[in-house]
Image: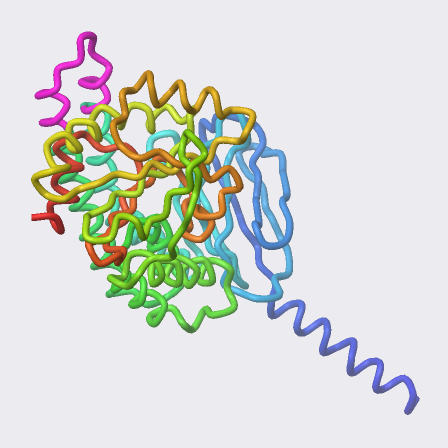
């Protein structure tokens, strides 16, 4: 009996821990686009269950928590929601009119509240983006209409950003961390530093680690400090260094030949370059990440687009890795002393790009 007792105690502890860390997700769905629903736990596993009479239940044990996960209908519907996995009874409901709604545990109740507060702002972004898209798609394209609709969607994005930042300040909890994730790629150093400090309680979480990485990259590239230098070959094989342009404003343009929005940005860069090159000591260095097999296409694209500035190639993607470039086009503004001051991700209309650069270049 004495030998058995320690084993019984260990077993009871294990059972107790399992119960303590167990979660249940009760899902109800009406008018769903598919009969299956996927619980995608990005850290550990992914489960797929069949809805029976519009219901299904996931159960499991979680080692560390809370964790950001995804739940939704699988491909081709791809209707999903973010959810916080933690011990307890989590509820998820779905209707075609309202989409997914979270409940049950404290973190998920908070996250749903934040989603609800952000929803009108995000719907405004979607609406204004569609309006700009309609203007852009017109043939012939009317520049004035594109610019005016772009300003409207810029304003919608700013309202959403301001509201998100406000909610993050009010919620230094895991739900606050979740709503911070979509904006960190575009945030300046000072805001990233705030997020690193506010969410330090989740230091072991992979999503928190991604914020730290964004902060560390921003510290090296857009914090007003000297940016990492480079030397890359131009179209003739001559080595070009960033240091060669000291004393001028330099816009680093990361792109590749088959990036459609990179190519659509080129006409705007051309107009800005013509206007600012001499008047404001402004240069552009386009850094292509095309592979050697595409060098001829790279050169032809430059000729076809009529780019007037320095073009170099980084086929190993060394510099994009250093700069944390995760999408194209991405622009980095470097001041006259070689300090990085601004990152701009994605396509911009000419006026919008001028406004962003004009915050620094007077």
* The N terminus, quarter of image: bottom right
Tell me which residue sits at (42%, 30%) in the image: 236
Residue 157 lies, with reference to residue 137, above or below; the image says below
- Where is residue 152? Give x, y as percent: 12, 33
- Taking the image as shown, residue 25 lies to the left or right of residue 178, namely right
- Main SS class of the magenta portion in the image: helix
* Residue 287: quadrant of the picture: top left
- Where is residue 32? Give x, y as percent: 47, 28
Q: Nearer the viewer, residue 99 or 356?
A: 356
- Where is residue 332? Give x, y as percent: 29, 47
- Where is residue 181? Give x, y as percent: 37, 53
Tell me which residue sits at (27%, 32%) in the image: 309
Magenta stretch: residue 193 in it? no
Q: Nearer the viewer, residue 31 or 77?
A: 77
Q: Is residue 116 visible?
A: no
Magenta stretch: residue 141 in it? yes
First to last magenta residue range:
132-149
Residue 141 lies, with reference to residue 56, above or below; the image says above
- Taking the image as shown, residue 144 lies to the left or right of residue 61, namely left
* Residue 123: quadrant of the picture: top left
Q: Nearer the viewer, residue 13 or 132?
A: 132
Tell me which residue sits at (44%, 62%) in the image: 208
Coloring applied to the structure? rainbow
């Amino acid at each position: 009996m004495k030998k058995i007792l320690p084993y019984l105690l260990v077993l009871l502890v294990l059972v107790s821990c399992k119960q303590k860390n167990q979660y249940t997700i009760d899902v109800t769905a009406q008018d769903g686009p598919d009969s299956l629903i996927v619980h995608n736990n990005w850290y550990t596993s992914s489960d797929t269950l069949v809805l029976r009479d519009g219901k299904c239940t996931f159960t499991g044990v979680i080692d560390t928590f809370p964790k950001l996960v995804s739940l939704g209908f699988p491909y081709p519907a791809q209707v999903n929601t973010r959810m916080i996995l933690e011990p307890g009874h989590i509820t998820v409901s779905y209707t075609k009119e309202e989409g997914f709604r979270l409940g049950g545990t404290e973190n998920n109740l908070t996250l749903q509240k934040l989603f609800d507060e952000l929803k009108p702002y995000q719907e405004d972004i979607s609406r204004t983006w569609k309006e700009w898209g309609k203007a852009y798609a017109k043939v012939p394209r009317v520049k004035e209409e594109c610019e005016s609709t772009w300003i409207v969607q810029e304003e919608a994005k700013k309202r959403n950003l301001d509201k998100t930042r406000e909610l993050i300040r009010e919620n230094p909890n895991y739900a606050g961390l979740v709503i911070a994730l979509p904006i960190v790629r575009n945030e300046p150093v000072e805001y990233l530093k705030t997020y690193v400090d506010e969410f330090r309680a989740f230091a072991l979480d992979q999503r928190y680690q991604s914020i730290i990485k964004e902060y560390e990259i921003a510290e090296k590239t857009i914090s007003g400090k000297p940016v990492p230098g480079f030397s890359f070959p131009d179209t003739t094989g001559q080595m070009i260094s960033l240091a060669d342009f000291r004393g001028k404003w330099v816009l680093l343009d990361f792109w590749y030949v088959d990036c459609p929005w990179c190519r659509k940005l080129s006409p705007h860069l051309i107009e800005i370059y013509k206007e600012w090159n001499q008047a404001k000591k402004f240069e552009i260095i386009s850094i292509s990440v095309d592979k050697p097999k595409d060098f001829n296409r790279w050169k032809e694209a430059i000729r076809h687009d009529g780019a007037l500035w320095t073009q170099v190639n980084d086929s190993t993607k060394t510099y994009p890795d250093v700069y944390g470039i995760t999408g194209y086009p991405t622009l980095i503004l470097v001041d006259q002393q070689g300090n990085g001051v601004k990152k701009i991700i994605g396509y911009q209309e000419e006026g919008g790009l001028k406004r962003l650069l004009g915050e620094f270049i007077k």
